[in-house]
């Protein structure tokens, strides 16, 4: 009987906590969604260097293709995944209408701080070295020490080589599928 | 261990008020790499402590001795989730940085409850004071750790405060040197720094 009492009390408390949490969730949900959307749009703006993307409607989750209302493609943003030194490095690559890379960002990585985190824009602008790379010539993309044009970083060969390979592969995949449909439209 | 049944007699400097939580804080030490992270975590843990203590005081008449610790765990878990949602809504950039570590606050608070009368506050007013004092102990320890690690690890102080308080406070940032000692910014640096801080505190307390 005493146990039944305990169970009843704790069940009631559990229900109260659940109701309170549902209330907090209701109050914060729209604000959280707005903040999340703004943060994703900021990433897209960083990738393309085009502030007008802040006006973009619809999903901001890559892969996506941003077009004018007339259907002309302005930017594509694709994902790339590299096997770095500390695990998978998730990258986003922005490409403009002339098929040139407008920017690359590592959105998630666990590379060694101070060494492999050159891929992180917070630590180094190394990743901006990909800006302007033409997608049709992606097969030539390589580190300088491998005969390419991207700066090699001392101490971070595995990381940087993996990132270069991941970007090369995602650009090559893009060349094979050039007619990606528009997922987002902005007034140009 | 000093008697701490009376939260109002707490001296967070002299008794275990700082050192106890500092050990309970071990899981949180790692992410306290900068002042802004430390401040965010300090505010979150104070909020969780105060809210859970007040809830426990409020439900005191309905609880029994058998249910108290389980009830406290339930309440702390609920408060932690609520605080997490609030941080996400009002400081999304900070949330991105410390998100993985916020749920650990629940463990910290429960660990603290083992030696504090947190599971059995007498009244709501006393619960508020007790929670605030406990939170202050946390905050002092976390902020000291975050500040030292930011100065040594990155050569800055208060960088990135805009993630918490908006762009107006960005000029508060101080920059001493351009690069820092990497070790202080890595997780082991947290333990080294915490050890040195405890040693410094002991040296001061036992000399006087």
Image (cartoon, rainbow, N blue to C red):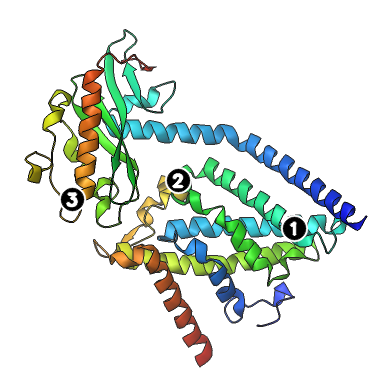
Locate residue B60, reporting x and y percent. 83, 59
Quadrant of image for the N terminus of chain A: bottom right
- The residue wearing badge 1 is B70
Locate residue B177 relative to residue B73 in the image: left or right. Answer: left
For residue B141, side relative to residue B69 (left or right) = left
- Disc 1/disc 3 C-alpha distance (Å): 51 Å
Mark 1–mark 2 Cα distance, whole angstroms, equals 30 Å
Residue A181 screen position, x and y as percent: 34, 14
Q: Is residue B96 visible?
A: yes
| Residue B59 position within the rendered picture, expressed as x and y whole percent measured from the top left | 81, 55
Q: Residues within 10 Å of mark 3 (few under 14, many from 20)?
A: some
| Residue A171 drawn above or below residue A120 | above
* Closer mark to the observer between disc 1 and disc 2: 1
Q: Given contact means CB atoms under 8 Å apart, are the residues at marks 3 and 2 in contact?
A: no
Name the mark nearer the viewer: 3 or 2.
Answer: 3
Where is residue A164 drawn, in percent x and y?
20, 39
| Quarter where residue A171 is shown | top left
Determine whether label 1 and label 2 are within 8 Å by CB.
no
Chain ID, mark 2: B
Q: Find disc 2 in the rendering and name its residue.
A: B96
Looking at the rendered image, the quarter that the C terminus of chain A falls into is: top left
């Amino acid at each position: 009987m005493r146990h039944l009492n305990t169970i009843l009390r704790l069940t009631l408390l559990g229900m109260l906590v659940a109701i309170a949490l549902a209330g907090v969730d209701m109050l914060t949900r729209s604000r959280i969604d707005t903040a999340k959307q703004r943060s994703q749009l900021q990433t897209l703006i960083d990738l393309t260097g085009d502030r007008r993307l802040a006006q973009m409607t619809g999903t901001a989750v890559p892969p996506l293709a941003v077009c004018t209302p007339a259907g002309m493609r302005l930017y594509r943003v694709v994902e790339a995944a590299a096997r770095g030194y500390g695990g998978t490095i998730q990258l986003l690559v922005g490409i403009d209408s002339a098929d040139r890379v407008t920017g690359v960002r590592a959105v998630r990585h666990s590379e060694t701080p101070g060494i492999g985190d050159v891929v992180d824009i917070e630590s180094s602008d190394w990743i901006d070295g990909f800006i302007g790379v033409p997608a049709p010539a992606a097969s030539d993309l390589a580190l300088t020490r491998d005969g390419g044009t991207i700066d090699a970083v001392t101490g971070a060969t595995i990381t940087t080589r993996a990132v270069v390979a991941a970007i090369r592969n995602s650009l090559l995949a893009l060349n094979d599928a050039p007619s990606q449909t528009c997922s987002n439209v902005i007034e140009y | 261990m000093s008697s701490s049944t009376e939260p109002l007699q707490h001296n967070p400097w002299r008794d275990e008020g700082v050192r106890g939580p500092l050990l309970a804080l071990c899981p949180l030490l790692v992410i306290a790499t900068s002042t802004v992270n430390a401040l965010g975590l300090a505010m979150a843990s104070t909020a969780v402590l105060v809210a859970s203590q007040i809830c426990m005081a409020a439900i005191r008449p309905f609880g029994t001795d058998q249910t108290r610790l389980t009830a406290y765990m339930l309440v702390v878990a609920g408060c932690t989730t609520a605080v997490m949602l609030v941080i996400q809504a009002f400081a999304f950039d900070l949330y991105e940085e410390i998100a993985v570590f916020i749920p650990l606050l629940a463990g910290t608070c429960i660990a603290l409850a083992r030696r504090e009368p947190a599971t059995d506050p007498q009244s709501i007013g006393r619960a508020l004071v007790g929670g605030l004092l406990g939170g202050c102990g946390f905050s002092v320890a976390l902020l000291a750790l975050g500040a030292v690690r930011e100065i040594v690890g990155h050569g800055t102080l208060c960088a990135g405060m805009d993630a918490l308080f908006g762009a107006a406070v960005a000029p508060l940032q101080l920059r001493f040197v351009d690069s820092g000692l990497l070790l202080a910014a890595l997780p082991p640096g947290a333990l080294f720094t915490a050890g040195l801080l405890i040693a410094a505190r002991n040296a001061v307390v036992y000399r006087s």
